[in-house]
Image (cartoon, helix red, strand yellow):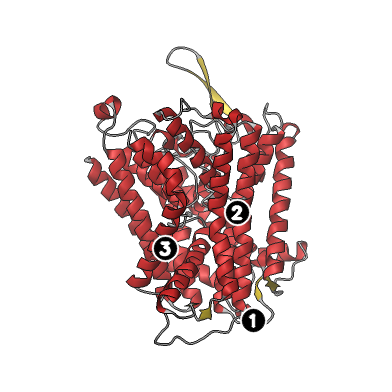
Amino acid sequence: MNPALAAGLQIALVVGVLALLYVPLGDYMAKVYGTDPDHRPRDLRVETVLYRLCRIDPRAEQTWYGYAASLLGFSAAGVLFLYVLQRIQGVLPLGGDLAGVSPSVAFNTAVSFVTNTNWQSYVPETTMSHLTQMVGLTVQNFVSAAVGISVAVALIRGFVRVSRGGEIGNFWVDLTRGSLRILLPLSLLVALILLSQGVVQSLRSGFDSTGLDGSAVTTALAPVASQEAIKELGTNGGGILAANSAHPFENPTPISNVVEIIALLLIPVCLTRTFGTMVGNRKQGLSLLAVMGILWSGMLAVAMAAESGTRGVAATAAGAMMEGKEVRFGVPGSVLFAVSTTGTSTGAVNSAHDSMSPLGGGTVLLNMLLGEIAPGGVGSGLYGLLVLAIVAVFVGGLLVGRTPEYLGKKLGRRQITLAALSVLVMPALVLIGTSITVILASTTGYMGNSGDPGTPQAIHGFSEVLYAFASAANNNGSAFGGLTVTSDWFQSALGVCMLFGRFLPIVLVLALAGSLVTEQRTAPTAGTLPTTGPMFAGLLTGTVALVAALTFFPALALGPIAEALQ
């Protein structure tokens, strides 16, 4: 099949399925959470049991302080539990012959999965037991995604509600409902589809066979399908096998590849409908969806063109940039996956991003540096874009000389300060972490493509470090594979970036929700900046691009841009 036709058909299928599910899933999620505490959906029996066991009053509302404290406490407990589980897995059931994980890897992994990053500095088959995978990592795939949705919903309530007490919901109720009513049933459905395509689901450690050269070969097995589903739906990305979604046991066919792409885009896209339904104006959600669509399609077009070209003898012979790509997916399936995974903070990969062309690799890197809001992670994409929408409204207000308003709430100094601080967290972590790493003499040896200053190898080594910190600070988890990150410096530095990159914006967003919920709603006037339609979508898209361009252009010029000009 012609590559252009193959790309067009896959894109059309992905967009078509998302369009089909957009309204029912978006409205269902709005119904699950609700905005009015007096008209909350009835609790399920299993939810009632959980509330009683955990001594939670589901009718109690929390201020942003209480909401944030509950969220941070729950996440801290998750880090501690996952760390201990990895350390003692050697004496637990389903451990096989695997010993406990080393302290630095256990710390990095615990932080990674709790922050929805799923950065992996280890080989899963030879490091993590089935028990650790199922009880530890898979559980965090569910609850970390539910945490992201909870924060987005809390911010929406800040716009919708007016409360003198500052209540924005109940974290424990939002967490429970997101896990049980949204993520769990969707994961079951996707897992069944993946099983039908040949994704494995086994508690055996592996099986022995004889290779073509006559040597004995041991092939690892694992409960893949159950984790693969939530890995994509929760925009987590951590593979249960080292090759991730390029492994034939995780992603065996072109159909499973499209299913996984749809899964990782599904909830972030449909949350814009949830937003529009909850605020009572679905055009608001469509405006955000338009911005996500513009950025996603633009990145996809650039990356597809870059990878469809030929650079070098091998690429010329193959007819495209096929190095590091699975032949069963080709360029179209690989690029569609790469752009979607870096745009959603998923981090799952079905090809080697390090092997992409300089322009293609720079595109997926820039996709993260935009803040991963196209369409972003589960929950984090929506609240990240809403923060940028507040900045865009503020800029628009300055242009027309009026106090900025968004969804009937006036945006004062406190709201703008919190929004600005939230936007600045990720760039600070990326640039500071990259700068310190490339300065340290002890780190250059870990760059697989390092070389003499000014050479293409050294330039690509810098890109690898920049990609690593962009991935960690944006809670993505993908990597340029030429960088070895097993040293204590990388384990600790990237772990800190993941923690601050996840929880600092969350605290600031919850504080923003708390400040908004106490504001009175005002009726729009003739001078109010409209936040629906093409004009606002263009303003918001320009704000996103401008913030990224001004912040990261010097760093990109030292890495992917310089490499592309070689």
Left or right: 195 as drawn, with respect to 86? left
The residue where tag 2 is placed is 502
Residue found at x 48% / y 30%: 482
Q: Quadrant of residue 203?
A: top right
Mark 1 to mark 3: distance in Å? Answer: 31 Å
For label 2, the SS is: helix
The type of residue carrying mark 1 is Ser
Hey, which residue is sitting farthest top in the picture? 214
Q: Are marks 2 and 3 in contact (CB under 8 Å)?
A: no
The type of residue carrying mark 3 is Thr
Residue found at x 57% / y 55%: 425
Residue density around tag 2, few if under 14, some if 14–19, many if 20 or more, within 10 Å:
many
Going from N to C along the chain, the mark reached first, 1 or 3, is: 1
Measuring from the top left, give residue 489's x and y in whole percent: 64, 35
Position of the C terminus, as image quadrant, is top left
For label 3, the SS is: helix
Going from N to C along the chain, the mark reached first, 2 or 3, is: 2
From the viewer's side, name the closer residue of 82 and 23. Answer: 82
From the viewer's side, name the closer residue of 427 and 355. Answer: 427
Residue found at x 45% / y 72%: 393
Residue density around tag 3, few if under 14, some if 14–19, many if 20 or more, within 10 Å:
some
**Label for residue 163?**
1
Mark 2 to mark 1: distance in Å? Answer: 27 Å
The relative height of residue 254 versus residue 262 in the rendered view (above or below) is above
Measuring from the top left, give residue 131's x and y in whole percent: 67, 39
The residue where tag 3 is placed is 543
Q: Which callout, 2 or 3, points to the residue nearer the camera?
A: 3
Measuring from the top left, give residue 503's x and y in whole percent: 63, 56
Mark 2 to mark 3: distance in Å? Answer: 22 Å
Q: Which callout, 1 or 3, points to the residue nearer the camera?
A: 3
Measuring from the top left, give residue 245's x and y in whole percent: 46, 39
The type of residue carrying mark 2 is Arg
